[in-house]
Amino acid sequence: MMKTIVGGAALCLAFSVMSVSAQAASCAGKDMTKAEDRMEGMSDVNPSKPAIAAELATASSALSEGKGRDCSIHLTKAVKLEAKAGI
């Protein structure tokens, strides 16, 4: 019984992480702006903030170069880092 409950909880967590990353994977201006706003709202002492800023900068650079896939990859990484940081 306990294994079923733990397994179900792990499955729910996996689906929620996948849905967050799938939604944020599009490099539309709105999605990029949301991620940047969440990062800017973080405390400056948060250890994840520099990594998130680097991913967002790389995503923005890739977008300006017309590399949509690379932008999507880096934006997804930034969103996952934000989720880990509790934003």
Image (cartoon, rainbow, N blue to C red):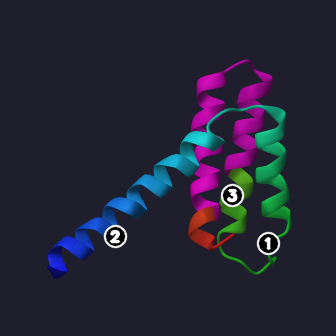
User: Considering the numbered disc 3 on the image, is that residue within a helix, a strand or a loop?
Assistant: helix
Is mark 1 in CB contact (under 8 Å) with mark 3? yes
The type of residue carrying mark 3 is Ile
The type of residue carrying mark 1 is Met
> Image quadrant of residue 51?
bottom right
Check disc 2 and report the residue beneath it.
9
Per the image, is 61 magenta?
Answer: yes
Among numbered discs 2 and 1, the one appearing first in the sequence? 2
Which quadrant is home to the C terminus?
A: bottom right
The residue at the point 70 percent across, 38 percent down is 59
Query: Against 35, is 23 above or below?
Result: above
Disc marking residue 52? 3
Please rate how many residues cluster around mark 2, counting C-alpha atoms within 10 Å: few if below 14, some from 14 to 19, many from 20: few
Measured in 3D between alpha carbons, the distance from the residue under mark 3 to the one under mark 2, in whole angstroms, is 27 Å
Which quadrant is home to the N terminus?
A: bottom left
Check disc 1 and report the residue beneath it.
42
